[in-house]
Amino acid sequence: MSAGMSLPARLVAPHPDVAPLPHAVTFDNGTRLLRGVPYAARDGVRPLELDLWLPRTARAGAAPLVLFVHGGAWLRGRRDDMGFRFREWSPGPMARIAAEGFAVACADYRLSGEAVFPAPLDDLASVLRWLTLRSAELGVDTGRTVVWGESAGAHLASLLALTHTSPPLAAAVVWYGPSDLTTPRGGFSPDSPASPEAGLLGGAPAELCDQARAASPLFRVHSGAPSFLVMHGAADTMVSRAHSEELAAALEKAGVPVGLRLVPGADHGWAGLSDGQVEEIFTRSLRFARESVS
């Protein structure tokens, strides 16, 4: 750092756009992990970081990207957590995706106790901006991005796929995510100021009609959207399966390639399924991601 800089300027950490990358951990299969990489600096907010798995260096060309978005009702969650059914996997799901030739980014986003919508969606767009900016040194092709989310993360993944244009996404994997914040379904009421959806918006959805529609993937569907794989437990007691059914129907009506699978006997987070059934859901989702960037 220049000796001519003031002490306050020296104390500030380098901006993520130019900060040195952390050292990568390399695993036996050649995949690498960069953990806790800052991707955005926002005043008054904790550092926003991502973990980045990279495939083995022997593969030619830049790697396609899976951007994973965690759940947690928009108010909690850990960036690399795919849900309780995957926490005992070894190797974990992100490592498995990387072993298939993808770069995998798992990113923090501002939670509802920190900022209201569209803050988390803006953060995910910033992830793609940062990865695109640093793509040459990372070996990542953000022009072949599949966004993959579960629960609240699936809601944000859907919105990102439907709204992000530079670069446009290749596909979205959506697991049991809300798609409409304006209509009562299951235990959700848009009149309640105490729901997770109200926390996301900063007030009861019924009182914030424009914001609720803007935050609802169902109302953001358009003919130019990327392909979707939508999966939902048929017995989900936390997020009604109607969210996925109606989103898939709207995508199909708009001419967007979409596959909908309602999984018999599955509750939220794939509760109620056998280990083999959960493995099949993951494998099918990964196969869809691979086919979408081929």
Image: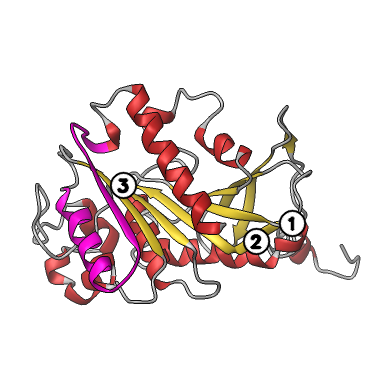
For marks 3 and 2, the one nearer the N-term is 2
Amino acid marked by disc 1: Gly
| Foreground: disc 3 or disc 1 | 1
- Up-down: is 121 above or below 271? below
Crowd band around label 2 with a 10 angstrom C-alpha radius: few (<14), some (14–19), many (20+): some
| Foreground: disc 3 or disc 2 | 2
What is the CA distance from the residue labelled 3 to the residue labelled 2? 26 Å
Name the element at disc 3: loop
- Up-down: is 261 above or below 169? above
User: Mark 2 = which residue?
Assistant: 141
Q: Residue at x 20, y 63 (%)?
A: 249
Amino acid marked by disc 2: Asp
Residue 10 image position (x, y, % from top left): 78, 61
User: Mark 3 = which residue?
Assistant: 151
Q: Residue at x 84, y 69 (%)?
A: 5
Q: Residue at x 79, y 43 (%)?
A: 58
Q: How many circles with numbers are drawn on the protein? A: 3
Amino acid marked by disc 3: Ser
Q: Residue at x 34, y 76 (%)?
A: 223
User: Mark 1 = which residue?
Assistant: 61
For marks 3 and 1, the one nearer the N-term is 1
What is the CA distance from the residue labelled 3 to the residue labelled 1? 33 Å
Residue 195 image position (x, y, % from top left): 18, 52
Q: Give the image's coloring scheme.
A: secondary structure
Name the element at disc 1: loop
Which segment did they paint magenta? 241-268
Q: Is residue 113 left or right of residue 131?
A: left
